[in-house]
Every structure is written in C-alpha cells, then in structure tokens.
Amino acid sequence: MRGLLIGLALVLALPVLGVLGAWVVIDAQSLAVLQQQFETVLPSYARQSLALVLAVALGVAVVGGATAAAVTLFDFHGRRFFEWALLLPLAMPAYVLAYAYTDALQYSGPLQIGLRALTGAKGALWPDVRSLGGAVLLFVACLYPYVYLLARTALAEQAAPMMEAARLLGAPLRRRVLEVALPMARPALAAGVALALMETLADYGVGAYFGLTTFTTGIYKAWLVLDDHVAAAQLASVLLAVVALLLWAEQRAQARIRFAANRPSAQGGSVASRPLALRGAQQALAWLVCGLPVLVGFVLPVAWLVRLLWRETGGGDDGAAASPVLAASYLVRFVGWAGASFRLAAAAALAAVLFALLLAFTLRRSQGRRARWLRGAAHVVSLGYAVPGAVVAVGILLWTGMVQAWQPQWGAAALVTGTTFGLLYAYMVRFTAVALQSVQAGYSRVPASIDESARLLGAGRRRTFVELHLPLLGRTTIAAALLVFVDTMKELPATLVLRPFGSDTLAVVAYQFARDERLAEAAMPSLAIVAVGLIPVMLLSRALRTR
C-alpha cells in the first residue's frame, strides 16, 4: 500500500516535472525560442504580471487588513453581520465578476446610456473596465477575504490584550491600531497576500477576457494559438518559479503566525480587552469600510447577473415576455452543462478524498524511513494546489507527448488528451491538496491512543480504518469533498485545454458566452457557479462562529 501511494503521488507530480523537464532537454531550437521570447513577448508578460500582482497585493492588504481590524478591534451595530458577510466574495470567481461589471459599466451598457440621457454628456463617462486597472479592482474585490480571514484570527488572538496595554500607557486610538495591532498581524497579512497573489497568477478568465498580456494568457496562446510547445513550457516554468516563491513566503508567514499564537499572553482573558464600542461618525465609517467590499464583491454583481438572467429567460427591458421556445432551449442546454459539471466535480471529489484518506491513514501508521517517504509524497501532493491550471495542463500534455514519442503503442496521448480521464487527472493534480489538508486536520483531532486501543483489542488496519477512523472523520471528509467539488466547478484554464470534445462545463460556457459578448446567456451558468461556491463559505462562517 505504501509503495502504491508513493507511486500515485509521483504520478500527480508528473505535470510539474514535465514543465521543468523542458529545460533538461533544451537544444539549439529551444534556445532560439527563448531568445525570441526575451526580445518580443516576455518583457510585456513580465511588466503586466508584475504591475498586476503589486497592485493586487497592496489592495488586498489594505482592504483585508482594514475589514479585519474593524470587526475584531471595534464593536458597532451590525458587526456580527459583517463578520460572515465579508466572506461572501470568496464564492465569486474573478471571471464572473468580470462578466457582470463589463456588462454593467461598458459604454453601451444601460448605466452609461441612462446617465448620458439624463445629463446630456457625450462620450464615455468613465474608463473602460476591461483594462489592467479594472482587473486589479476585480481581483481585490474577490480575493481580499484571504487576508481578512488570517488577519482577523491573528488580531483576535494577539492584538486585543496589547491594545489594552497601550491604552493604559496613554497611546491614542490611531497609534494603538497603526503601531500595535497591525504590526502584530503582519505575518497574517503576508500569508493572506501570498495566497491572493497565487490566485491572481493562476487566473485565466479575467486576463483573457480583458485582453491582458500576463504569463497565464501567454501560456495558453503559445500552446493553442501558436502551437509552440517549447515556448509554452518555458513560460509555464517561469510562472511556476514565481508561484513557488510565493508559496515559500506564505509557508514562512504561516510558521510565524503559529509561533506568535503559541506565545503566552499575560492578559489573554482580560475583560478590559474587549472590542472598543463605536458610535456616530466612527460607526458610519466602520459600516463604510465593511459594507463597500461586500457590496462591490458580491451584492452588486449578483444583482446584475440576476437582472441579465431575467432579461434572457423571463422578460426583456421593455417588460415583454421572452420567447418560450428560446427559454426552453436555453434551459435544456443549461441542464446539460450543469450535469457535466456536477459529474466531473463529484468524480474529482470522490477520487481526491479517497486518496487523501488512504495517504493520511498510512502516514499516521508509518514510522521510520517509510514515514519519511510518505511525508515526502504528502508534500509533493500538497504543492499541486499552488500550481496554476494552465501550468498543469501544459505539464500533462508535455509528458504525454514524451511518452507517446517513446512508446507509441501505449496510446498515452489518446488516453489523456481530450478525455474525461485526462480532465480528472488535472483536477486531481490541482485539488488533492485541498482534501489532504482537510483530512490531516481531522486526524490531528483523533488521539493516537484510539489506534493503540484498537490494536490491543485485535483490530487490524482495515477494520481500524473502516469502523473507527471513518466515522470519526465523517464531517471532515464531507467538508473536504465539498471543497474539492466547488474548486472543480470553478476551474477554467485546465478545463478549456483538456475537456472532451462537446462536453462543456458551466465555467467553460460562461467564458465562451462572455467572450462572444453574449453576457445575458452567461448569467445563468455564472450564477450557478456562485451558488455552489456559497457552500464552503457558509461552512467556514459557521466554523468561525463556533470557535
């Protein structure tokens, strides 16, 4: 069993190894391609990607830190509502935000038309949302909860007692927040920013829809448009290196959070360290700080998508009913897309959770050198979630091509390219880490003495796992499956490259409709993705309330 699990972990690592292997077999042609990229597209990709991540980093740090400080350090009317409402943008993929705001704010949209008619103005009333600045705002609106979650926990555990000590020493409120609370939450802010930037670099939908020249869009273009596999692999390796650096920074920041959280606090239970009550203008400012991100990141785009959906299937802008034939045809197609998405997501969730359960159980029961090998396998699997979908797709196609050239009779290309198996393989590479982290967190709450008691009573490994561990890990297993299910439903770049012909998911059809400027038809699949994304958000909100 151990050997099989280690082998499966290595199989999941093959896409990353395939991308890195492109540099091992580099030749004169590959060097020429690399030089050509340095002279043409690479500087543009680097500049725009760097500008994007720097602006998003600043935005999510400010918004996430401000909202976390507001609900943790202060008490105001509506605080309990904002504690969970600030998590809602997590359910909104960035590309869905892009579709909603493009339709709402574009020059030919109803808002600009109405305002021009009302004011008599000529020309565009604001810059085009499909730009680098618009992408930054959208990413900040949907990714700030990563910073909010980690900073909120850090502030609640560490900052309140020190804030009270600073107050007793005569420090004013502004100084207590800026010089005491926020510096203590700096590791949490850094970890949250790193997670948000990994999501930003992994995104394809917003970059392609807005016409940005980032590394992810460049990889997709090099492979599928220019049919240049070497260029795609080189770009993918550069992106992989940047993501690895961010992952290292996030893990280092997480370690600093754990170190700070484990330090004893002399005033941890002080009644005087309760949140400071706000009234009047200060309370209004807290409402603005907490309400604006929820409004921009969730409420307004959902409301606009509902309007688009009503116009498409229920009635036009003039109130006339839509064609029943059109509505019925659209609904039939939607059922097909939703069915394909749910089948793929359910299969990926089942496979990822089963593998995570077996790996975590075997790791728990192993010792010595075998345990080191298994820990290495678990670490390899955990890296998958940080790898962008475009890199996973390129890596799968690269090593498949190598195997096909080496052993044509094996039919590796036919097995992986454009098949459900290949798509599920990509999902496993990306999202098994989510299931493994959840299962390991569940196992950390199961005492080792339970295993010893079962062994003394004569229970074997299989019986211990099936009759003892699985019931204890029931809620953890369900949560892990839901997280993988939702992530699979939202995944776009790998699905675009590897999906079987004629089998579209909700994410793919939403992107295709938006690309063709059929935003009304993109509304229903987009709303379905958001609705599914609310499941883990609600679970997370409930877990935070029960702490």
Image (spheres, rainbow, N blue to C red):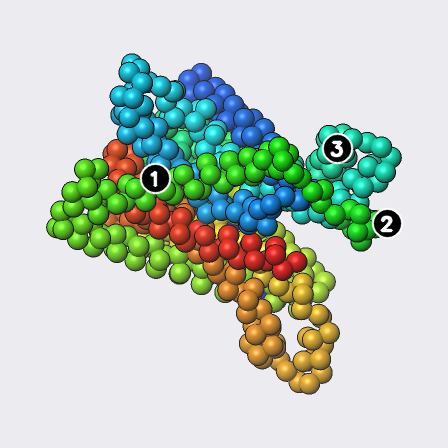
Name the amino acid, label 1: Trp
How packed mark 3 is, by other alpha carbons closer than 10 Å (few <14, some 14-19, many 20 or more), is few
Identify which residue, 143 or 246, lies in the foreground: 143
Name above or below for residue 490 compared with residue 249.
Answer: below
Instruction: Name which quarter of the figure residue 102 lies in.
Output: top left
Residue sitting at x 84%, y 40%: 165
Res. 183 in view = no
Q: Which mark is residue 173?
A: 3
Between the C-alphas of marks 2 and 3, the distance is 22 Å
How packed mark 2 is, by other alpha carbons closer than 10 Å (few <14, some 14-19, many 20 or more), is few
Tally the numbered discs: 3
Identify which residue, 357 or 127, lies in the foreground: 127
Q: Could you say where residue 321 lies in the image, as x and y percent from the top left?
A: 16, 46
Q: Are marks 2 and 1 in contact (CB under 8 Å)?
A: no
Quadrant in the picture for the N terminus: bottom right
Residue sitting at x 49%, y 46%: 88
| Kind of element beneath mark 3 | helix
Q: Of label 2 and label 3, which has the lower sequence position? A: 3
Q: Could you say where residue 248 lies in the image, as x and y percent from the top left?
A: 64, 39
Give the residue pinned by disc 1: 304
How packed mark 1 is, by other alpha carbons closer than 10 Å (few <14, some 14-19, many 20 or more), is some
